[in-house]
Image: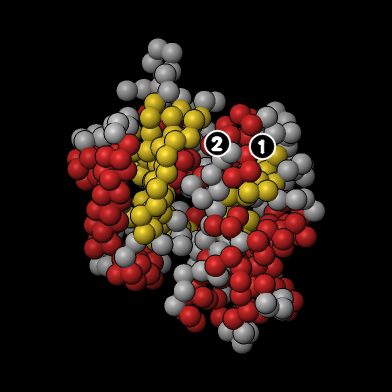
Amino acid sequence: MSIEEGTRRPLRAIGLMSGTSMDGVDVALVETDGEAAVTPGPTAFTPYPDELRTLLKRANEVALGLDDRTARPEPLAEAERWVTEIQATAVRTFVEALGAQPDVVGFHGQTVMHAPDRGLTIQLGDGQAMADRLGIPVVFDLRAADMAAGGEGAPLVPVFHRALVLQAGLELPAAVLNIGGVANVTWVGADGDLVAFDTGPGNALIDDMMEARHHQMMDEGGARASEGTVNRSVVEAYLGDSYFARPAPKSLDRSQFDRSLTDPLSTEDAAATLVAVTAESVAHGLKQLPAYPKSLTIGGGGARNPVMMEALAGAVGLEPRSADGLGWSAAFLEAQAFAYLAVRALGGLPITFPGTTGVAEPQTGGRIARP
């Protein structure tokens, strides 16, 4: 089934996203033609068990030493089986509650390594096994084609952000910022041109610090950061990383930055300092855009952190607004994006562009597994 056929009728697509926080999988239904028409539907979240999160951290450590994106030494092989099984079960449960079969599933998989400088990216997830289990076509491995063509392989969501921005009628240029483990920005110009890149760390540094010190997955609501004091020397040390001097487009692995820089600080001061690192790296990124955006819309976990939102407002000179305020979904924006990208993949439409990944020409992407 292709959106290129006939009148390009909208398809019902389920998107799956398990981000670098490795806390679980977001599931989202979108009805879309893969172009301008986007109608969001129900959403759900399935947490990962602690055993899988531990396994994925081990897989991440092993993956950093690989030079073959298809290699599956242990613990990657076991982690891939778990990720596929848990996410397929999440889709089946979601579909049963929905009471209707979707046309396609967009399966991002679980990233355990992303090194564009080495031409490598590894997402765990067996698309064919999922398609066979669900009886639904599955689009997966969405980054590989872009990287094979010389692109960064990330970010992938900008074309979806553009559809939402244009559908909402936002004044252009407009920016959409996703603050997950890594933060990435999409800029939509007055002529619809796209520029996108990872601005720097998102929540990963804070999340890792909270788990290491307190066995908590995050600084819920910015509670710790709200009681801390920013350490300027640590902020400057992070912002001195060579990544920030690179021109866009560019992308990051969550392991890029030195987690030990905040070790001497109290939890409160460390959290406040890392919020400042995220906010100031976003401000630096916005200045690299072709024109400063007239608005900044926030998705991802960072949108639920009032301390982060306040720090962004002070750093960027705009009043950031949660995607929820536009009737979008801050929490499920990326899962919705992978539903949208799956439909584009079925129709042979490009998903990455010179301004988003640095690839020379717009690229289609994704492998299609049919049951």
Tell me, yes or no, if residue 125 can be seen here.
yes
Q: Amino acid at mark 2?
A: Val
Q: Say if 281 sits above or below 265 in the image.
A: above
- Mark 2 secondary-structure assignment: helix
Q: Which residue is mark 2?
A: 159
- Mark 1 secondary-structure assignment: strand
From the top left corner, tell me how far across and down residue 139 is, in percent: 34, 38
In this picture, residue 370 sits left or right of residue 322:
left
Residue 188's disc is: 1
In this picture, residue 248 sits left or right of residue 57:
right
Nearest the viewer among 212 and 356 is 212
Image quadrant in which you'd find residue 269:
bottom right
Residue drawn at x 35%, y 67% is 53
Residue drawn at x 36%, y 22% is 2
Residue drawn at x 73%, y 43% is 295
Q: Say if 160 sits above or below 319 in the image.
A: above
Q: Amino acid at mark 1?
A: Val
Tell me, yes or no, if residue 345 can be seen here.
no
Quadrant position of the C terminus in the picture: top left
From the top left corner, tell me how far across and down residue 268 is, in percent: 63, 79
Q: Total marks drawn?
A: 2
Image quadrant in which you'd find residue 136:
top left
Nearest the viewer among 97 and 301 is 97
C-alpha span from label 1 to label 2: 9 Å
Residue 173's disc is: none
Q: Say if 224 sits above or below 92 in the image.
A: below
